[in-house]
Image (tube, rainbow, N blue to C red):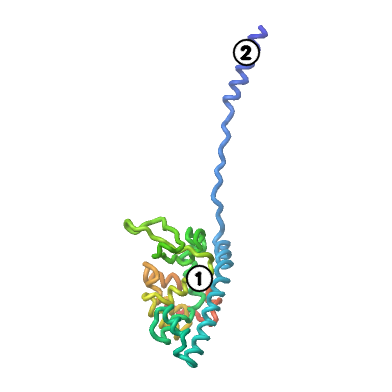
Amino acid sequence: MKIALLILTLLFITSCEQKKPVEEIKVKKPQTISVQEKKRRFRELLVPAVNEAYLELSNEYKKVSILIKTDEHNKKLENLRTKYKVQTNTELLTAIKPHPKSIALAQAALESAWGTSRFFKEANNVFGVWSFNKNEPRIAAGEKRGDKTIWLKKYISIKDSVKDYYLTLAKGRAFKEFRELKISTDNPYELVLKLDKYSEKGEEYANELTSVISYNKFNLYDEHQFERNSSF
């Protein structure tokens, strides 16, 4: 009798254990941050880098301007013309003069998705600058153009990315009109209209830059303040 009772007890315990609910596996959801926090982090990272790059170029522009007036055949000017791929000292000035910081910040925001893109995180590539040199540090894009891999430059720091971006606009054939205009004006709302070739979006890209500058008040970082004209 006792043995039978013991067997029944064991069977009951086993049955209860089998009916125990399986604990749910808790999957951690990816952490999300607010738009305000994302933009705050972006400014924290980009504004100092843009300020430094802009100041360095401004100082160089002033020195070159003086050198052209005092010794236009100086060897340094010749080296700089080679660096910027220009023929004359006038073209050299248009290349070196830095464009408004508001434009750099707006492009950085669009090209890096406010500092959240993979290229930004893994390669400090703020502006989506492509690489055509297999011997330089770079990373592959996730998508291809047909059967060709797209490569993007990998930078040591965010500041290096900003400096190379300024150099890209100073040398690129597609930005000749942009350079010619920035020698006569610092109005970012006029200048962005000449950056339609920076993106496949064309004119729409220029409109996006205008909106980003205006909405986020990036123009407050510029040395000269301009109001957005309704015609831009």
Q: Position of residue 155 (x, y in %)?
A: 50, 65
| Residues at marks 2 and 1, CA–CA distance in whole angstroms | 78 Å
Q: Position of residue 123 (x, y in %)?
A: 49, 61
The one of 155 and 231 positioned closer to us in this rendering: 155
The residue under the point 38% across, 84% down is 87
Secondary structure beneath dot 2 equals helix
Q: Amino acid at mark 2?
A: Ile
The one of 180 and 96 positioned closer to us in this rendering: 96
The residue under the point 32% across, 57% down is 146
Confirm or deny contact between disc 2 and disc 1 (CB under 8 A). no
Q: Nearer the viewer, mark 2 or mark 1?
A: 1
Residue 107 vertical placement versus 184 (above, below): above
> Of all residues shown, which one is farthest toward the left?
146
Residue 138 vertical placement versus 188 (above, below): above
Quadrant assignment for the N terminus: top right
> Of all residues shown, which one is farthest toward the bottom?
70
- Label 2 sits on residue: 7
- Label 1 sits on residue: 162
**Residue 231 seen in render:** no
Quadrant assignment for the C terminus: bottom left
Q: Is residue 174 left or right of residue 123?
A: left
> Of all residues shown, which one is farthest toward the front?
75
Q: Amino acid at mark 1?
A: Val
Q: So how many labels did they put on this image?
A: 2
